[in-house]
Image (tube, grey):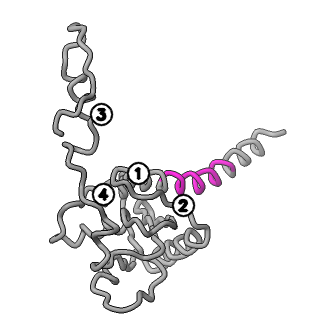
Amino acid sequence: MSLKIILFLIAVECNQSFGIGLRAFILEAHNRRRAKYGNQPMVLDEDLCQQCSEYAKQIVKTDGVYKEDYMSNLHATGPITSKHIQIVCLFRDAYPRDCVRDWFHYRGFADNKKYYKFTAMIWNASTRLGVGLGRIQETRYLVVRYAPPGNILQEMESNVPKRPTIFWDSQDIIADFLESTLPSTSGLKVVSANVFG
C-alpha cells in the first residue's frame, strides 16, 4: 500500500473519531458536573446531535449569526411548546469542554442572565443532549441542546438543587492543594477529610 493511501486512511479515521469524540467529551463534562448536584446523567440523542450540527452549519453560512433560547421558558405560565433549550458557545483558543466549565461556574448568581446557562445544563428533568460544532476560520461555535427543555421558574427548586455546602466542589481539591504546597522532603501525607462540614 502506498504511503499516500495510508495517510489518507489515517486522516479519514481521525476526522470520524474527532466528531464522535467531541460528543463524548461534552457529554462527560456535563454528567460530571450534574453528578456534583446529585442529578441524573444525560445521554446523547442522535436526532438532537444532527439538529445541532445543522444549526452549526447555518451559523457558518450566516457569518456567525446565532440565537440562544435558554431563557425562553423562564416565565411560562402554560404548557411548554419548545422541544429543547439551546446554548451556543463561541471560542477560539480553548477546548470545547471549557464552554461547559464556564457555564457551570455561573452557578449561584441568579441576578446574572448567564446563571440560566448553568441551570439549563444542570436541569434534572433534561435527560437528552445534542452537540454540534461549526467553524469560521479560527472561531468555533459549539451548539448544545437539552431536551426535554428546562429553565421553568416554577420548577426551578425541584430541578436545580442547592449548591453543595462544602468548600469548592470537592474535598479532594483541598487535599491536592495542600499536598502540592507541602515540601516534598517533609514525608507528610495529606489525607482528605471533611474539614468544613
Identify residue type, mark 2: Val
Q: How far apart are marks 3 and 4 (CA)?
A: 19 Å
* Magenta-drawn segment: 13-25
Residue sitting farthest toward the right: 1
Q: Which secondary structure lies at badge 4?
A: helix
Nearest to viewer (mark 1 / mark 4): 4
Q: Do the CB atoms of the residues marked 1 and 4 lie less than 8 Å apart?
A: no
First along the sequence among labels 3 and 1? 1
**Place of residue 92 in the rendered image (x, y in percent of width and height, measured from the top left):** 37, 57
**Place of residue 42 in the rendered image (x, y in percent of width and height, measured from the top left):** 49, 60
Q: How far apart are marks 3 and 1 (CA)?
A: 24 Å
Identify residue type, mark 1: Tyr
Identify the residue position indicated by label 1 in the image. 95
Identify the residue position indicated by label 4 in the image. 104
Identify the residue position indicated by label 3 in the image. 172
Q: Toward the viewer: 94 or 103?
A: 103
Identify residue type, mark 3: Asp
Q: Do the CB atoms of the residues marked 2 and 3 lie less than 8 Å apart?
A: no
Q: Toward the viewer: 143 or 112?
A: 112
Identify the residue position indicated by label 2 in the image. 43
Q: Say left or right for 123 vs 162.
A: right
Q: Residue 55 carries which label?
A: none
Picture quadrant where residue 47 is located: bottom right
